[in-house]
Image: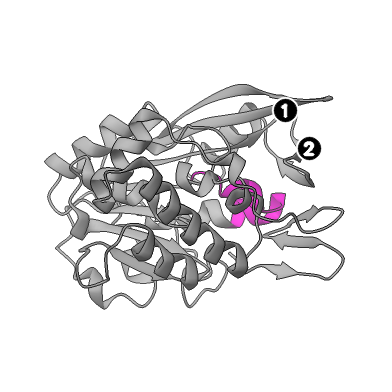
Amino acid sequence: MEGPAIHDDSTTLLGDITFQTASTPTVDTSFYSLSSEEATFFKAQTGIDDDEDLKKHILEVQAKAYKVAPYPCIHTFVFLRNRTFLRLNLSNLSVYKQILELGRERPDALLLDIGCCFGVDARKAAADGFPAKNIIASDVLNEFLQLSHELFKMTPASYPGCFLPGDVFDPAFLSIVAPSDNVSPAPAIDLSLLKSLNPLHGRISAINAISFFHLFNEEKQLHVARALAGLLSAQPGSIICGYQVGTLEKGMVAASISGFKHRLFAHSPKTWSSLWDGEVFEKGSVKVETELVEIAIPEVQFFMMKWSVVRL
């Protein structure tokens, strides 16, 4: 994924999306809120028990992140909710239990959190039992990965998971290969030695791509799908899943969220399913499930799409 481009006319480019505002909004702390489940998670992870102290800590990290890239997701605190502007994240997807089972039952199962921002999904999966040493969290902005350690009051030395910065459109970091047909378990790999995702072709048991694909145009979405498919293990039950902007008929979608206006390309459930089952993977070799969820946004009909692709 390409890094951000920020212009003087209050436009921010994230992937292929141009966010436009009358002026770059200042940080608004009124957007801060945590559900009881989120508060429990962050308190357990940071060791901060007091609500006000936790809020102060998160606000400090948010301010640093907003200086790196003034994205809407940082402005409205959705980086706490795994990069979506709803409180839906990997742990709320129906396949999450299956992913955790892979971590428990499949020898040396690997989980990739791609476009991870602060890697909240990765850390939540680790807290819920997926071996942290087998989790890779990757984002194009290394600053976000560094701030993840600050947010969770850890260091690279104290957290066993792998944080790997890189651009998914750089073949030196992630090249496209045909989906693997080798169902034999792969030998263990030392993730601390990784410089790119390419050594993981055909080895990853689960890939989380929440709020990632909709950052790109139609051609690039197909590119990323093929690239991630090449990473996925051929063993039955291996999963790619996500949550992104969807639509009834594929095409451009426009919306205004928290003062940020944007247009992006979105697939429909039908075109998204046919992309994976028949174009990326051989027809009939995967099970694709999709669900459109309508979001209340003034003056427009707006949908998010939950989805999963499971190898058969």
Residue drawn where x is 59% and y is 57% of the image: 223
Nearer the observer, 259 or 223: 259
Q: Residues within 10 Å of mark 1 (few under 14, many from 20)?
A: some
**Residue 255, disc:** 2
Q: Secondary structure at mark 2?
A: strand
Left or right of 99? Residue 59 is right
Disc 1: which residue? 302
- Of marks 1 and 2, which one's residue comes earlier in the chain? 2
Stretch of the chain drawn in magenta:
210-223
Res. 2 image quadrant = bottom right
Specify the quadrant of the image occupied by residue 6: bottom right
**Does any portion of residue 279 appear in the rendered image?**
yes
What is the image's colouring?
one colour
The C terminus lies in quadrant: top left
Name the one closer to the observer, 179 or 122. Answer: 122
> Residue 275: x and y, percent?
59, 40
Total number of numbered discs in the rendering = 2
* Labels 1 and 2 touching (C-beta < 8 A): yes
| Relative height, residue 268 to residue 264 (above, below) | above
Quarter of the image where the N terminus is located: bottom right
In the picture, measured across the screen, residue 108 lies left or right of residue 115, that is left
